[in-house]
Amino acid sequence: MKLRALILDDEYPARAELRYLLSKTKTKVEVVGEATHAEEALQLLRAIPYDLVFLDIELPGLDGIALAEEIRQLKKPPVIIFVTAYEQYALKAFDVNAVDYLLKPVSEERLEKALSKITKQLAESEPPAAEYATLPKLVAERKGKTVLINPNEVYFAVVKDNTVLLKLYNELLITRYTLKELEDKLQALGTNFFRAHRGHLVNLEHVKEIISYINGAYSLIMADEAQTEIPVSRGQSKRLRELLKL
């Protein structure tokens, strides 16, 4: 089971440290979203099913305890783990049904223990994130903030340095998908994305021009600002001809 998580902390170093620790745990955790304040977190939690959320307590605006009360009112609330530097809120944390309360700095062993509790708890019921693949939005990162993107806004997806990037008209956004995960999600949504070759998924709705070569190969000129040219692999050229009736 891979757990889908949201991290809420107003300090970037704290979020980065927790991401790093989660990447090392035996329990598989995918950090799908990050937020810096409660309102941002609630927006993400209402839009995307999560299995768990890591909450700091002392935050600008609504604090972590009050936010936990709001989270409990969601249709399918995620499991809550508090991650904080303050001991004095522990009793209040468990009053809002937090599964665990971790004190900073968090050790890998302590984090693994908390995740084991969650895995056991979720194994007894269907995890809410099982519905994730059919949500009509893509999750990406823009300037350190998690954003929701309509698939139609995406011109193509490209793998660079083992990271999948979404190309909009004039910007690149980071994602935490693998290209196969993204391809499966887009297929489930019924979109017109095409695997041009191993490293590119192309939105056929945003192809401006198709260049054909004597050897039967193709390149696609996209309608993004840069008019990016994307080659089609030999193996995918036949599929492209079938799709576009070339």
Image (tube, grey):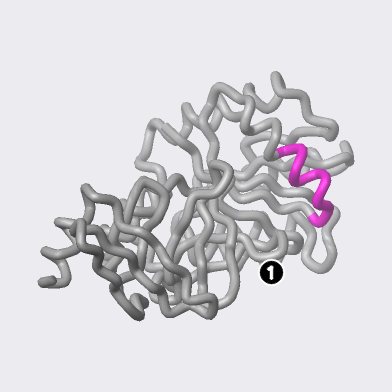
The quarter of the picture where the N terminus appears is top left
Instruction: Give the image location of residue 173, x and y in percent.
Output: 58, 63
Pick whichever, 209 or 223, lies toward us.
Answer: 209
Q: Position of residue 105 (x, y in %)?
A: 84, 31
- Residue lying at the far top in this picture: please name it: 109
Q: Which residues are magenta?
A: 10-18
Q: Which residue is mark 1?
A: 39
Q: Quadrant of residue 108?
A: top right
> Could you say which quadrant of the image residue 35 lies in?
bottom right
Q: Is residue 169 left or right of residue 111?
A: left
Q: Residue 98 appears at what percent x and percent y? A: 65, 42
Q: Secondary structure at mark 1?
A: helix
Q: What main secondary structure does the magenta stretch of the protein show?
A: helix
Q: Residue at x 87, y 37 (%)?
A: 87
Left or right for 116, reference 195: right
Q: Residue at (34%, 68%) from the top-left corner?
A: 220
